[in-house]
Image: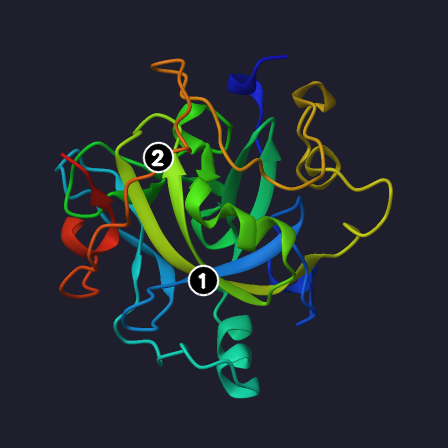
């Protein structure tokens, strides 16, 4: 069965077992939120008219400027994130890559785009190369091997090898049932077992399907922070030229 024939539904708040226990890596069934490291405000799903004028509404993923700042880890800020379902992302593994599925976007997976004012959006329910992400090698060690409740990383995209998404990951909990041996994304979301989604941590590097060369092993330093958190290309993603 091909990925094109698969559909899925992300876990909603009632399906999540919230908890603040530290854990290592990004694993199937983890529920996380993205924070903008500069403003401390969370990313959230926003349904908007297509900015490219094609007529259909789209689910964008941008920093919520109206949300309370959550850069300091307190019981109150954690509770706000748990109550903000539009900020919840369910982690799903796809081979050597990871995807982020949002209930607030009707179970669609996070994508990056080549252009546009907002480069992050949710488009399809099925895994393809546009829905695949991996940790930049410079940040993988801390996120993969050390237990954390929040950690700042750079995510890279399988297709757009120059794109960097710098976010603070906040661990919110796990999808109910994901602690059992029977848990797989296929069981939770009706996907075919032939996807062979295996548990475990994301590798420190991944290979680019476009060039066939390591895409996560760049040694160049992170780019400077953007000037704001308004969801523009300048502050949502950084891209080397």
Does the rendering let one see residue 107? no
Residue 1's spot in the image, x, y percent? 64, 12
Q: Residues within 10 Å of mark 2 (few under 14, many from 20)?
A: few
Mark 2 and mark 1 residues within 8 Å of each other at the beta carbon: no
Residue 170 against residue 144 in the figure, above or below? below
First in sequence, mark 2 or 1: give its number: 1
Residue 147's spot in the image, x, y percent? 65, 61
Q: Secondary structure at mark 1?
A: helix
* Nearer-the-camera pick, 30 or 67: 30
Residue in the picture at 12% in, 37% down:
53
Marks 2/1: CA–CA distance: 29 Å
Q: Residues within 10 Å of mark 1 (few under 14, many from 20)?
A: many
* Nearer-the-camera pick, 92 or 226: 226
Residue 163 against residue 196 in the figure, above or below? below
Residue, disc 1: 87
Residue 32 against residue 212 in the figure, above or below? below
Residue 64's spot in the image, x, y percent? 30, 67
Residue 186's spot in the image, x, y percent? 70, 33
Residue, disc 2: 218
Judged by depth in the image, the label closer to the viewer, 2 or 1, is 2
Residue in the picture at 34% in, 73% down:
40
Does the rendering let one see residue 167? yes
């Amino acid at each position: 069965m091909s990925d094109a024939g698969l559909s899925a539904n992300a876990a909603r708040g009632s399906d999540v077992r919230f908890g603040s226990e530290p854990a290592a890596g990004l694993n199937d069934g983890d529920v996380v939120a993205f924070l903008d490291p500069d403003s401390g405000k969370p990313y959230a799903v926003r349904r908007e008219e297509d900015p490219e004028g094609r007529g259909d509404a789209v689910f964008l993923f941008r920093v919520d400027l109206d949300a309370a700042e959550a850069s300091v880890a307190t019981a109150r800020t954690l509770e706000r994130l748990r109550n903000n379902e539009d900020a919840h992302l369910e982690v799903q593994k796809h081979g050597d890559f990871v995807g982020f599925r949002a209930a607030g976007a009707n179970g669609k997976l996070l994508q990056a785009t080549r252009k546009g004012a907002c480069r992050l959006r949710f488009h399809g329910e099925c895994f393809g190369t546009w829905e695949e992400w991996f940790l930049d090698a410079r940040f993988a060690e801390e996120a993969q091997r050390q237990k954390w409740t929040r950690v700042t990383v750079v995510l890279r995209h399988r297709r757009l090898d120059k794109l960097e998404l710098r976010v603070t990951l906040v661990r919110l909990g796990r999808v109910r049932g994901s602690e059992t041996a029977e848990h797989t994304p296929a069981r939770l979301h009706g996907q075919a077992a032939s996807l062979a989604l295996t548990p475990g941590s994301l590798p420190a590097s991944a290979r680019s399907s476009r060039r066939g060369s390591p895409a996560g092993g760049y040694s160049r330093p992170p780019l400077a922070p953007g000037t704001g958190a308004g969801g523009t290309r300048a502050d949502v993603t950084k891209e080397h030229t």
